[in-house]
Amino acid sequence: MPRVLKVPAPVGPGGHLRVLSPGMPTLAYVPDRVERGVRALTDAGWKVSFGENAFLISADGLTAGTPAERARDLMDAFTDPSVDAILAADAGLGSEDLLDALDPDLIAAHPKPFLGYCDNVYLNHFLAAKAGISSLYGCTFMVHIGEAGGAYPETLDYLAAALDSAAPLRCHPVPSRTAGVIDWYVPDRERIPRTRDVPGGWTWLRPGVARGPLLGGELTLLPELIERFDLTLDGTLLFWDVSYHGLDVAPLFAALCAAADLTRLGGMIIGGHPQLTPEDWAKTVRELVDEHLPEPAFPIVVNADISHTCPAWIVPFGEEADLDPVGGLLFRRGRTAGRS
């Protein structure tokens, strides 16, 4: 990753958001959620359009069209002068398939914010490593904006704040969360609002203060991301979380530690677990870091809101941040960001 990333220009309310489908075809499968998402964004003052291929369904039913079709929508969004920012419709799988069809030089010549999460993190890393621009992580149109009962206020607040790259962005723990699973394919269940029954707040395993560029992703993806983008994590604030897959975290964390030297991190931020209580998750992570990283003294916080629980923070990916127990996670922003 370049030592300094270019930060796309700020986008304010009234800006034009292009929604496209890098991965799963949920736009085509759940039209009610699409309508709710459009309504939430337009009520908040944004203009909304969709990529030409965003509603396609691939032959196997797993993605929104072919990799070439999905990549073309992304390139069109970057080069279309009427588009101010790009929002992924959904993630899950398929984002990695776009990478070989993207033109990093053309993207770098037309920088604008891209926002995704989960499997979309392949695109966040590509934009940082190949195009030299920062992006945004933590939200998709279908999961977060189309929420049954309306998008959570924190989601819309973080969206507006994250798109305004001219102003600092400070992230504090949300008061409560939901870890409910969205039943995409049963309309009577999909339209039931999820309950925010998980208490908010983060847990400091090793308190301290740190500064560094924020990088990371879902735990199962990180070893491959490290290899594919030849990541050096010295001095970074590394974030990770787990999805709803239910896999044993211990071998996954061991694989992460084997993939990169984590002893010289600036800090580690672990998102809340969608299937464990905050207390049980903090205990699990403490045991893992005590086993694999017993010596390093960098700050480690768990149950942060960079996770598959909702609402979640929307954070600048690749930009430098300050982490401390009192001030939270602070991005000072600016036209360039990264290791100083």
Image (cartoon, rainbow, N blue to C red):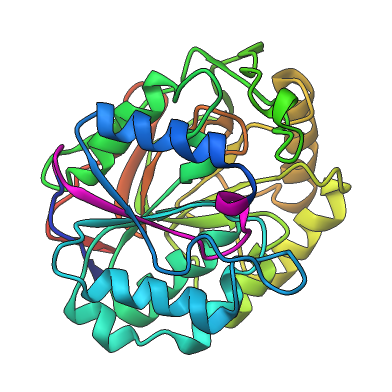
At x 76%, y 34%, the residue is 186
* Residue 212 location (% of width, % of height): 35, 54
Side of 10 relative to 22 (left or right): left
Q: Position of residue 81 (x, y in %)?
A: 14, 69
The answer to whether 236 is drawn above or below residue 243 in the figure is below
From where the camera sits, is residue 230 visible? no
From this viewpoint, is residue 107 visible? yes
Magenta region includes residue 137 = no
Query: Which residue occupies the foreground of this view, 55 or 273?
Result: 55
Horizontal and vertical percent position of residue 242: 70, 45
Q: State left or right for residue 87 relative to residue 47.
A: right
- Magenta segment includes 17: yes
Residue 76: image location, x then y, percent: 31, 75
Which of the 4 quarters of the picture holds residue 329? top left
Q: Quadrant of the N terminus?
A: bottom left
Which residue is found at the position 42% from the left and 25% from the top?
325
Q: Where 260 falls versus 106 (above or below)?
A: above
Towards the viewer: 77 or 241: 77
Number of numbered discs visible in the structure rendering = 0
Q: In percent of the image, x 62 and y 79: which residue is there?
A: 227
- Range drawn in magenta: 12-28
Question: In the displayed structure, would residue 201 be above or below residue 216?
Answer: above
Q: Which quadrant of the figure contains the C terminus?
A: bottom left
Task: Residue at 44%, 64% (x, y): give it.
Answer: 124
